[in-house]
Image (spheres, helix red, strand yellow):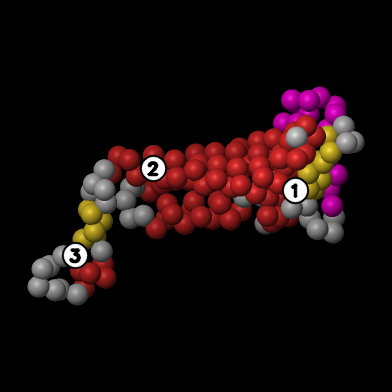
């Protein structure tokens, strides 16, 4: 799955680059690592490796939605589709923008790659999760572990605020 997702991410970012900057971009696939390198006018490049394909972010998002006992199956499937598409699109644009940063502002590349885009993708996840949970407001989620232990106060739920 990693090789396919990495190449798909690189090829999609390459298509955005070709659309945005014309023929000044090209992609070379690395058969050994399974990654790909995006080149910009033969001056700068970014390597898209397995860590750049957003697989872990996809799994984090899916895990969150599946672990929340609120919402219908159709609602979860809808949010899975919209969320995964949003994460993929954000990541593809991120790779393209990193290519532009490598060309025009190489001194900022590490900061933008390691910090700015990391914060940005997690903010996107929080926004997606917020919109999923927003209609439920302060409904109560049953806590099965507490419900099996009938204590004196009979507190068998957790409030979501």
Q: Residues within 10 Å of mark 2 (few under 14, many from 20)?
A: few
Q: Tell me the element at label 3.
A: loop
Whichever of labels 3 and 2 marks the residue nearer the N terminus, that label is 2
Q: Which mark is residue 128?
A: none
Q: Is residue 15 visible?
A: no
Picture coordinates of residue 138, whole percent (x, y): 23, 46
Whichever of labels 1 and 3 marks the residue nearer the N terminus, that label is 1
How much space separates mark 1 and mark 3, taking CA atoms?
A: 48 Å
| Residue in view at x 23 percent, y 48 percent | 139
> What residue would you read off at disc 3?
156
Q: Residues within 10 Å of mark 3 (few under 14, many from 20)?
A: some
Q: Is residue 122 visible?
A: yes
Q: Residues within 10 Å of mark 1 (few under 14, many from 20)?
A: many
Compared across the picture, whether 60 is left or right of 104 comes to left
> What residue would you read off at disc 1?
48
Q: Residue 23 in magenta? A: yes
> What residue would you read off at disc 2?
130
Picture coordinates of residue 105, whole percent (x, y): 75, 35
Instruction: In the displayed orientation, state which residue is furthest to the left.
Output: 152
Q: Quadrant of residue 38?
A: top right
Q: Which residues are magenta?
A: 13-30
Give the overall secondary structure of the magenta segment.
helix
Picture coordinates of residue 42, whole percent (x, y): 90, 36
Whichever of labels 2 and 1 marks the residue nearer the N terminus, that label is 1
How much space separates mark 2 and mark 1, taking CA atoms?
A: 30 Å
Picture coordinates of residue 49, whole percent (x, y): 74, 53
Query: Contact (CB < 8 A) between labels 1 and 3?
Result: no
Instruction: In the displayed orientation, state which residue is furthest to the right.
Output: 42
| Residue in view at x 26 percent, y 48 percent | 161
How much space separates mark 3 and mark 2, taking CA atoms?
A: 25 Å
Q: Quadrant of residue 2?
A: bottom right
Compared across the picture, whether 153 is left or right of 86 comes to left
């Amino acid at each position: 799955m990693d090789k396919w997702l990495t190449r798909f991410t690189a090829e999609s970012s390459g298509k955005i680059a070709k659309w945005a900057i014309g023929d000044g971009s090209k992609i070379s696939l690395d058969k050994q690592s399974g990654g790909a390198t995006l080149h910009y006018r033969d001056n700068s490049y970014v390597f898209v490796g397995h860590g750049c394909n957003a697989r872990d972010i996809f799994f984090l998002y899916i895990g969150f939605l599946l672990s929340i006992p609120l919402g219908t199956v159709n609602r979860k499937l809808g949010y899975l589709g919209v969320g995964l598409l949003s994460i993929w699109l954000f990541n593809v644009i991120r790779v393209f923008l990193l290519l532009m940063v490598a060309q025009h502002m190489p001194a900022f590349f590490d900061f933008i790659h390691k910090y700015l885009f990391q914060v940005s993708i997690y903010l996107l996840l929080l926004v997606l999760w917020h919109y999923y949970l927003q209609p439920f407001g302060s409904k109560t989620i049953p806590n099965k572990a507490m419900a099996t232990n009938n204590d004196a106060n009979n507190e068998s739920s957790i409030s979501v605020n």
